[in-house]
Image (cartoon, rainbow, N blue to C red):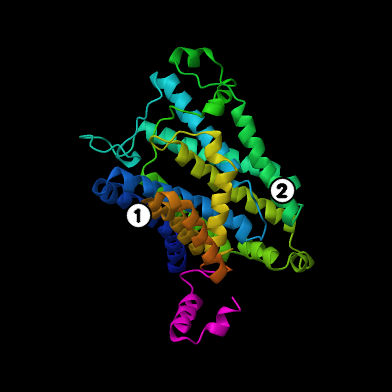
């Protein structure tokens, strides 16, 4: 009689290390929705949503601009593609199944105050499915754009990605208005539905499923993937391209392949962020919301945090999101002060807040202690 071999302690510990961060991510997301959300007003809650979505965008762009040293200027295009794809799935599926494009979520989707409301519903499953599809569609487009364009470098790559973002914006502007009645939706074919996304007026009526749970679950998963990618063999190939692409090629690294992979992974998470953004209450999605200015904001976050620093991207996303709000008391000078603050930060911290360091690195804390003691002046010049 054969007996099953019990799992070895090493296997168990590796499984715990592998899956525990995702369990913690779910726990953090539940706390944000169940504990934090009921105790804050709608305006601070909206700021928390914006911070989370910007964190996903900044960390995902770090995988391209920071890890591989490329310069993409069309990140908002992937956000737009993911947002419109996700919104089309939830809106038109809701119209076909329930006869109305309203949200049918549970507690974790931000439906507060409902007595006996379930934590998760069929609508939540539809929303999660739409987020994944939006991310996959954005990643597929990232592959199609990245494969030919990432053979370019520097300014040429920046121009191509900028052009891609503008192409996405113009194509969306030329689409048909949104179908508004269940009868119109039933008469339309599946192939016709993606063309009805609001045109230049924007895609309104998307059901609002986005709550703190989904946003911060997305933030945690993005951080976990970015951290593991950076510390993996795959990520080391990314970093070698950033440090010296010619040397990386000489060592056998397929630089084009790895750059395309970085582009695809970044586009996937940008699509997820777009889906979360499009399902936020009172926001909707328009071509202007995901145009060049949005891409520029994300680039500021990445550069300000430090090219290649995951924690720096998160810190910069928080600062860039909150700084305009802190300056509302001087509304007439707000944008001037905002621009000056960014300029001063880049003058005194030209490599960003963290440079290439992470907040959890021992070297970061050693460097901070040297700065406090006044002995790190020369070391700071070598960041």
- Residue at 39% x, 47% y is 49
Q: Are marks 2 and 1 in contact (CB under 8 Å)?
A: no
Residue 368: x percent and y percent?
46, 78
The secondary structure type at the circle numbered 2 is: helix
Residue 61 in percent (x, y) is at 58, 53
Q: Compared with residue 221, is residue 186 higher up or lower down, i.e. above or below?
A: above
What are the residue bounds of the magenta stretch? 354-383
Residue occupying the far left of the picture: 115
Residue 355 position, x and y percent, is 56, 69
Residue 225 shown in magenta? no
Residue under the image location 48 percent in, 59 percent down: 316
Check disc 1 and report its element: helix, strand or loop: helix
Q: On screen, 339 above or below 200?
A: below
Q: Is residue 329 above or below residue 66?
A: above
Of circles 2 and 1, the one toward us is 2
Q: CA distance from mark 2 to mark 1?
A: 39 Å
- Graded by Cα atoms within 10 Å as few (under 14), some (14 to 19) or many (20 or more), the crowding at tag 2 reads some
- Residue at image mark 2: 159
Q: Is residue 362 magenta?
A: yes
What crowding class fits label 1: few (fewer than 14 Cα within 10 Å), some (14-19), or many (20 or more)?
A: some
* Image quarter hosting the N terminus: bottom left
Residue at the disc numbered 1 = 28
Q: For this view, does 70 lie left or right of residue 54?
A: right
The residue furthest front is: 332
Q: Residue at x 68, y 46 (%)?
A: 161
């Amino acid at each position: 009689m054969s007996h099953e071999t019990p799992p070895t302690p090493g296997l168990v510990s590796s499984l715990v290390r592998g899956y525990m961060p995702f369990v913690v991510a779910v726990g953090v997301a539940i706390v944000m929705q169940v504990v934090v959300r009921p105790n804050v007003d709608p305006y601070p809650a909206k700021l928390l949503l914006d911070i989370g979505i910007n964190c996903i965008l900044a960390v995902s762009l770090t995988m391209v601009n920071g890890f591989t040293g490329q310069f993409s200027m069309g990140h908002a295009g992937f956000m737009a593609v993911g947002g419109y794809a996700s919104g089309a799935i939830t809106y038109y599926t809701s119209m076909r199944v329930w006869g109305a494009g309203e949200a049918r979520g549970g507690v974790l989707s931000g439906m507060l105050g409902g007595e006996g409301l379930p934590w998760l519903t069929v609508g939540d499953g539809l929303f999660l499915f739409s987020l994944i599809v939006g991310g996959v569609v954005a990643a597929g487009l990232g592959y199609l754009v990245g494969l030919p364009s990432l053979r370019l470098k520097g300014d040429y790559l920046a121009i191509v990605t900028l052009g891609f973002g503008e192409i996405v914006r113009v194509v969306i502007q030329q689409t048909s208005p949104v179908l508004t009645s269940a009868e119109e939706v039933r008469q339309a074919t599946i192939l016709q539905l993606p063309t009805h996304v609001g045109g230049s007026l924007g895609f309104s009526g998307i059901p609002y499923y986005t709550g703190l749970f989904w946003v911060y679950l997305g933030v945690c998963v993005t951080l976990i993937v970015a951290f593991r990618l950076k510390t993996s063999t795959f990520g080391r190939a990314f970093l070698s391209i950033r440090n010296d692409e010619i040397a990386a090629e000489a060592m056998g690294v397929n630089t084009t392949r790895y750059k395309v992979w970085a582009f695809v992974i970044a586009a996937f998470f940008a699509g997820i962020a777009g889906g979360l953004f499009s399902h936020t209450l009172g926001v909707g999605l328009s071509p202007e919301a995901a145009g060049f200015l949005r891409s520029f904001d994300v680039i500021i976050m990445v550069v300000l945090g430090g090219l290649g620093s995951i924690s720096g991207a998160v810190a910069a996303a928080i600062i860039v999101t909150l700084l305009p709000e802190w300056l509302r008391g001087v509304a007439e000078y707000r944008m001037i002060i905002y621009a000056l603050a960014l300029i001063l930060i880049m003058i005194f911290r030209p490599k960003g807040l963290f440079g290439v360091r992470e907040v959890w690195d021992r070297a970061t804390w050693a460097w901070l202690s040297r700065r406090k003691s006044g002995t790190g002046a020369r070391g700071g010049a070598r960041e």
